[in-house]
Image (cartoon, helix red, strand yellow):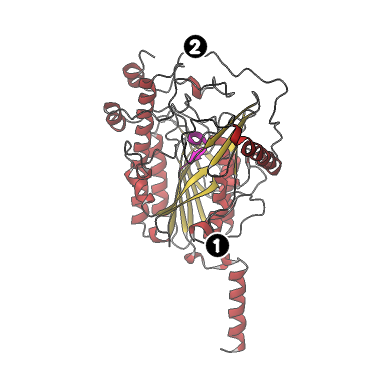
Amino acid sequence: MDSNLRRISACLILLVLTGYVSELPAADKPNFLFLFADDQRDDSISAYGNSQIDTPHIDSIVDRAFSFNRAYCMGSMHGAVCQPSRAMLMSGRTLYRVPMDLKKTALMPETLGNAGYTTFGTGKWHNGQESFVRAFQQGQNVFFGGMSDHTKVPLKDISADGKVIDKGNDNGFSSELFADAAIGFLKSAPDDKPFFAYVSFTSPHDPRQPPKEYVEKYYNNLPPLPDNFMPQHPFFNGWMTGRDEALAAWPRTPEVVQQQLAEYYGMITHMDAQIGRILKALQESGRADNTYVIYTADHGLAVGSHGLLGKQSVYEHSMGTPLMIAGPGIKRDSSEALVYLLDLFPTITDLAGVETPKSVEGQSLAPIIKGQKESVRDTLYLTYEKYMRGLTDGRWKLIRYPHINYTQLFDLENDPSELHNLAEKVEQKSRVDQMMTQLKDWQQQVDDKTPLTSENPKEMEIDLSGRKRTADKHQPAWIVEKYFGND
C-alpha cells in the first residue's frame, strides 16, 4: 500500500472511530418508518401476550424486532399527555426543558433532513404548524390538534414551498387516511436518498368509534377486565374529574369498562389493518431490507385499571408504552432496560450514522440492541402535573402524591398490577427513604421544582357519587344507543 492509500485509510478509520459515519454515501444509509399510536397500552398487542386482541401486522413487526419491555413517557404538566410526549420524542429533551411548540430546539426529522434524508410526515401533530414545516420536507393528511371525530379529521397538506394547505374534514376514517398518505410517499420516495417517514395515528384515542366490522367481534365476546379493575380509585389522586374520567359514570361497572375495552380493541385492530397496508407498500418498494421499522405509542391508558379511564397518572398502564425496533441486522429479542420515548431521537441518529445534536438529553438505545450494553440508566423518573411523582429502578416503584402527602411503594416483580402498597411497612422504611432521595435528585436533574410535601394537604377522600357519563358528541349514535343507553 503506497503512502497516499495509507493516509486515506487512516482518515477513514479516524472518521469511523470519531463517529463521523454520516459521511457515508446516501445510498448506504438506512431508511426509517416510524409508526406511532395514540393512547395505546403496552399490553394491547397479541404478540406481547394478550390473547384477546387481534394485531397480526404489529405482531409481524414484533416477530423480527428488538422489544423494549420497560418503555415510558416521562409524563406531563397537563391533561393532554400526548402533547408533551410528542414534544419530548421529537426533541429528545426532558419534560421541563422542551417548549410545547418545539420552537428553538433541534428536531429529529429536521436533523435527518439536514443530513440528506427525505423526510415525510402524516397524521397527528400536536405541537404547532411552524414546527412541523421546519421538521418535515413533505407532509400529507396532517392533523394539527389533539383529538377529533375519526371520520371528520381536519386535514392539511404541506406544499413544496412550506405552505400549509387546508383540505377540509370530510374525507374518511383517520387511520385509513394516514395510511393512504404513507403508502403514497413510499411509492414516490426518491431512490437516491434515504427516507424518514413518520406515521402518527390518532387511534386508539377516543372518541373510540371503530368501523362496525372491527368492533362487533369484541362486543360479541367482551374482553376480560384488567386484573387491577376497581369501581373507583381508592383516594383522590388529583385528577379524577377531568375529561377522560367523565367518559363513564361513577362507580365504574364491569359492563361499561368491558364495552369500552371492546371499542378500544376495535380501534387497535382497525389501525393494525392499516399498518399491514403500509408494511406491504414498504415491501413492494424494494427498500424493506434497508429500513428500520419503529413501532410505539405516546403513552398508555387506564381503561378501567385502578378505577381510572385516562392516562393522567404515573401507573404502569398509563405511562408505559409498547416499543419495538426492527430492521437491518436486528433479530427478535427483548430488554428490561428502563427507557424513555425521548431516547429514540439519539437512537435513530445513531443507527443513521448522523451526529446527534448537543441539545438532546436522551440516551441512544443502539448499544442495547447491539448487545454492547444492558441499560442506559439505573432509575427512571415519572411525573404528572403537580399531583404525582414516580421513580422506579425496574423492580421497585415509588409514587408520591404531594397534594395529599401520600406515598405508594410497589414491588413490580411480584405485583406488576400495582395493587399492594408497601410504603407503610416497617421493613420498607429505608427503601422508601432512599427512593425519596433519588426522586429529589431526579427533580434537580430535570428542573422539576414541585415540592414533594404540602404544607396544606388536600383531603384524600373524594365523593364522586351521582356523577354521570358525559355525552360524547363524536361517539356514533349506534354505539351510544345500543351499548350505553342505560349509562
The residue that appears at 53% across and 35% down in the rendered structure is: 410
Would residue 325 be found to the left or right of residue 433 on screen? left
Residue 404 numbered mark, or none: none
For the view shown, which residue lies furthest in the bottom direction? 2
Query: Can residue 127 be spotted in the picture?
Result: no
Indicate whether 140 appears above or below 20: above
For the residue pair 81 and 108, the one nearer the viewer reads as: 81
For the view shown, which residue lies furthest in the top direction? 466
- The part of the chain drawn in magenta is 316-322
Q: Look at mark 2 in the image and give the residue it sits on.
A: 465
Residue 332 placement (x, y as % from top left): 39, 55
* Kind of residue at badge 1: Gly
Other residues around mark 2 within 10 Å, as few (<14) / some (14–19) / many (≥20):
few
Q: Look at mark 1 in the image and give the residue it sits on.
A: 353
The residue that appears at 56% across and 89% down in the rendered structure is: 1
Indicate whether 118 appears above or below 341: below
Other residues around mark 1 within 10 Å, as few (<14) / some (14–19) / many (≥20):
many
Residue 204 placement (x, y as % from top left): 42, 34
For the residue pair 464 and 152, the one nearer the viewer reads as: 464
The residue that appears at 42% across and 50% down in the rendered structure is: 185
Residue 348 placement (x, y as % from top left): 53, 55
For the residue pair 241 and 420, the one nearer the viewer reads as: 420
Q: CA distance from mark 1 to mark 2?
A: 57 Å
